[in-house]
Amino acid sequence: MKLSRGLQSFWTLLSSYCIFAIAIGLLNRWLMGGRAGAITLLLTGIGLFALLTYIKFILVKGLPREWKYKTHSHPDFISLDPDHEWLHQQTSILKSLGFEKLVDFELEGTSNPGLARLLIHPQQYCWAEISQIKATSGEMRGETITQTAISSIFDKEWTISSANRAPFSFDGISYIWRHPRKLRMFLPNISLTEMFENHLRFRQRMLTSLSITLSTDLSWNAYQEAQQHYLEHMKRSLRRKPLLVSMIEATQFELKPKFEWLGDYGKLL
């Protein structure tokens, strides 16, 4: 997979700065001696640290503080939906599996606007979100990314989410702030029905092996709280992790996309 423009720009900037710093250091060492060259390299090292700190500041600042949304009535939602036939198809399949529609909403305050329909399963206690995101930047600019994700929440911060699409390059950025107890799977080659069955089987394994409890609160407020908590985790994770480590991880993901993230649970398997 080709690196995204953002990562290409980062590595180009970093490599150019390092080449410049080494060249200036060697030049000063040749003209003024070893001590001057060492001082120059020290100063350029401080400059590199300042540059990485500034880039991290911009990235953190770019994340929204709140998970914002706007709910829609059914006619309004359909008028905004560029692919309502796909929405109807996914909704019909989910309803045949026992899901019930909860709310239609539109994401706000993000660089990539999106529409979503949230459904709940009153018997199996899980959510299903049908979403469409309009990419406004990067190599996928102008494209509409669609997916249906089924998710379950447990106590002790554990969650499991399954999506019926392949990972894209922009998923490399979200991989940076992955949570050790928030499991994620990309399953592009199976039907929605199979994905639901797989989700329930894997969820039961988690319940048994981790001795955790499944949340039965399927309210809209509970969903909002879960999204807000994850957003706050994203910002904390990005602040704490060294930027260079984050960029290396994102690059590795884009070059070799991961179809699942099992976090701490994977260590038990």
Image (tube, rainbow, N blue to C red):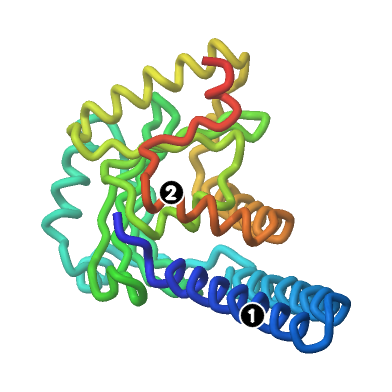
**How far across and how far down the image is residue 99, in percent?**
30, 36
Q: Can you tell which mark lies on residue 253?
A: 2
Q: Residue at x 35, y 48 (%)?
A: 129
**How far across and how far down the image is residue 211, in percent?**
62, 14
Q: Residue at x 65, y 52 (%)?
A: 233
Rendered image quadrant of residue 151? top left
Structural crowding at the residue carrying mark 2, measured as other residues with C-alpha within 10 Å and reported as few (<14), some (14–19) or many (≥20): many
Q: Residue at x 47, y 35 (%)?
A: 261
Residue nearest the viewer, comparing 144 with 204: 144
Q: Quadrant of the N terminus?
A: bottom left
Residue nearest the viewer, comparing 248 with 132: 248
Q: Look at mark 1 in the image and give the residue it sits on.
A: 23
Q: Amino acid at mark 2?
A: Phe
Q: Is residue 168 left or right of residue 18?
A: left
Residue nearest the viewer, comparing 30 with 41: 30
Structural crowding at the residue carrying mark 1, measured as other residues with C-alpha within 10 Å and reported as few (<14), some (14–19) or many (≥20): some
Q: Amino acid at mark 1?
A: Ala
Q: Nearer the viewer, mark 2 or mark 1?
A: 1
**How far across and how far down the image is residue 110, in percent?**
47, 72
Q: Can you tell which mark lies on residue 141?
A: none
